[in-house]
Image (cartoon, grey):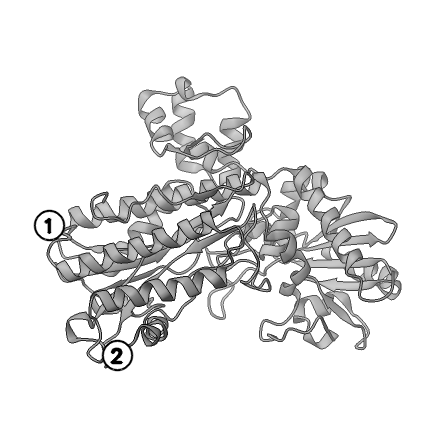
């Protein structure tokens, strides 16, 4: 009976939370299943480095689909945000009302057909733990500050029966979770009543998702006409009401990850690493028997991410072969690869808690690094540059991402001079400037609930425990670079790993499960 149940469950499960609920809330164990099912459940087990006893010791299909963020931590985040707003009060010592909007569910063109990929607003995830489309168009309200007790209210669209027939059950299905993180749970139509009662006497803060996406200025406050139409219609505010931006303050909290968040980052990076490693091995074997298309490789990576526990991919996969590897944001992924081509793939995945990985690897399609000695040597040099950059983070307690970028340009300039890549005479100082032209992106960005996490936080902050970030040196010899010798033109490569400064002050490379050096692939 249990074996039949397991087979049906594996085929019919609707969400990661549902699988966890069925398999973790009961006394069910791997040993209760048949060898066939047990093998399926254990097949993706990967060691996960542990910093504390509460970490995930092993990655399995069950643990990959189980939330690591507790309701107690969510409640603590509410309190921390309100304290930070009180500390940075803009208008005297008035209490505040904070509105955090969820993303809207996108639809295909002008139809009512919902898109399968739903990306929740990261601020909303951080303050609610909700990632799925069930929470689309919701609003979290936090009320209090300056001596008032904090009250949290979730507003959600309560769908009619016919709408639920089309779209599935609404957020009321998750009432136990909502009640554990909020004081009240109301229909979205009641938000206007709350605002008419509280807004005149309070500072009003709104998350970035509540503003028009075209509004990119850095002002600390905005007028009502800058709100997105959905929220503006819900609030019905006076046109002169000043609206303060909440997200820059919240990102100060999000920047340093808690121990539970660090474990979530370890988990999602393990999933991404396994997916990338399996994709690399697959292309090597596939290329021996058939012609490989970039679309095959991108699809394989996405399949491996989802198969091993990811909820989504983090961003559109970049998979460029041959000369297309010099296009940093190439995304067509539709060309056939020549047998001796190298490919560069930039991809990542999102876990059940909304945290993201971001990995880039470059390798020869057929797995033979010896076909092009120049490419192999350049790749080895690039890997060595990355190793030196990560060592610099470990050895310098005052390191920042901007300082790391300057060091990258210096190290790449030495590589370019050692390889005699220029067809003109270049001084060491000029080589540093040219290195930036050949790697025109930053060496790092913060990583977390967004791939480019906490965008309002400068990259000149000293790296501290809890910070997670990428290290990604690259070289792109586009055919338009006239100062580069012909044999280098058309070569593009990058190596990108995800790094955590853990709570012990130690640097962890979270993506070591995916090798990049030729002798390890």
The residue drawn where x is 32% and y is 48% is: 276
What secondary structure is marked by label 2?
loop
| Residue 153 drawn at (x, y percent) | 76, 50
Q: Horizontally, is 328 left or right of 204 in the view? A: left
Q: In the rendered image, which quarter is residue 444 located in?
A: bottom left
Give the residue at x 53% y 38%: 17
Callout 2–callout 1 Cβ contact below 8 Å: no
Taking the image as drawn, is residue 349 in sight? Answer: no
Q: What element carries label 1?
A: loop
Q: Mark 2 points at which residue?
A: 481
Count of numbered tags? 2
Residue 28, position in %: x, y? Answer: 48, 21
Q: Horizontal placement of 499 versus 454: left or right? A: left
Q: Which mark is residue 289?
A: 1
Q: Is residue 430 above or below residue 285?
A: below
Residue nearest the observer in this picture, 252 or 176:
252
Q: Position of residue 245 (x, y in %)?
A: 70, 66
Q: Which mark is residue 517?
A: none
> Does residue 498 appear left or right of residue 34 in this picture?
right
Residue found at x 56% / y 56%: 462
What is the quadrant of the C terminus in the image?
A: top left
Mark 2, other Cα within 10 Å: few <14 / some 14–19 / many ≥20: some
Up the image or down, 501 lies above or below 212; here it is above
Q: Which of marks 2 and 1 is nearer the N terminus?
A: 1
Q: Nearer the viewer, residue 115 or 389?
A: 389
The reply to whether residue 87 is in sight is yes
Question: As displayed, is residue 325 above or below residue 301?
Answer: below
* Spot occupied by residue 509 in the image (x, y as percentages of width and height): 41, 45
Could you give the CA–CA distance between mark 2 and mark 1, rounded to whole angstroms? 36 Å
């Amino acid at each position: 009976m249990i074996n039949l149940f397991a087979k049906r469950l594996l085929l019919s499960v609707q969400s990661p939370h549902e699988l966890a609920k069925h398999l973790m809330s009961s006394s069910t164990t791997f040993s209760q299943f048949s060898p066939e099912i047990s093998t399926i459940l254990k097949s993706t087990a990967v060691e996960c480095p542990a910093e504390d006893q509460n970490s995930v010791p092993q990655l399995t299909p069950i643990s990959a689909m189980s939330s690591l963020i507790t309701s107690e931590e969510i409640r603590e985040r509410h309190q921390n945000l309100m304290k930070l707003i009180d500390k940075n009060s803009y208008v005297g010592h008035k209490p505040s009302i904070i509105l955090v909007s969820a993303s809207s569910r996108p639809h295909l063109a002008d139809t009512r057909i919902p898109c399968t990929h739903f990306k929740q607003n990261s601020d909303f995830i951080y303050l609610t733990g909700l990632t799925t489309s069930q929470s689309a168009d919701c609003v979290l309200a936090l009320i209090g500050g300056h001596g008032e007790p904090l009250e949290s209210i979730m507003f959600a669209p309560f769908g009619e029966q016919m709408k639920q027939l089309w779209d599935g059950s609404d957020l009321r299905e998750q009432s136990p979770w909502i009640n554990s993180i909020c004081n009240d749970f109301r229909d979205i139509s009641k938000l206007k009543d709350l605002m008419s009662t509280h807004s005149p006497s309070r500072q009003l803060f709104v998350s970035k998702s509540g503003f028009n996406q075209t509004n990119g200025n850095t002002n600390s406050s905005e007028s009502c006409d800058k709100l997105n139409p959905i929220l503006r219609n819900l609030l019905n505010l006076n046109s002169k009401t000043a609206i303060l931006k909440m997200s820059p303050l919240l990102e100060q909290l999000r920047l340093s990850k808690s121990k539970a968040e660090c474990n979530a980052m370890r988990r999602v990076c393990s999933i991404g690493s396994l997916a990338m490693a399996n994709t690399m091995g697959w292309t090597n074997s596939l290329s021996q028997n058939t012609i490989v298309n970039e679309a095959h490789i991108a699809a394989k990576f996405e399949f491996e991410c989802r198969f091993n526990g990811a909820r989504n991919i983090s961003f559109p996969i970049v998979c460029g072969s041959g000369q297309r590897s010099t296009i940093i944001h190439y995304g067509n992924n539709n060309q056939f690869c020549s047998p001796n081509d190298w490919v560069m793939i930039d991809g990542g995945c999102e876990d059940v808690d909304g945290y993201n990985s971001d990995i880039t690897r470059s390798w020869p399609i057929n797995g033979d690094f010896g076909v092009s000695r120049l490419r192999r040597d350049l790749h080895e040099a690039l890997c060595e540059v990355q190793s030196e950059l990560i060592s610099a983070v470990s050895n310098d307690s005052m390191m920042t991402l901007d300082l790391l970028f300057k060091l990258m340009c210096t190290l790449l300039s030495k590589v370019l001079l050692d390889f005699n890549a220029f067809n003109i005479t270049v001084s060491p100082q000029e080589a540093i400037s040219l290195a930036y032209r050949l790697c025109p992106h930053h060496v790092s960005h913060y990583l977390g609930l967004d791939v480019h996490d906490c965008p309002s936080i400068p990259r000149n902050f000293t790296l501290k425990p809890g910070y997670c970030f990428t290290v990604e040196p690259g070289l792109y010899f586009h055919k338009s670079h006239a100062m580069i010798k012909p044999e280098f033109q058309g070569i593009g490569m990058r190596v990108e790993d995800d790094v955590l400064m853990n709570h012990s002050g130690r640097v962890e490379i979270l993506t070591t499960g995916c090798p990049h050096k030729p002798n390890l692939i």
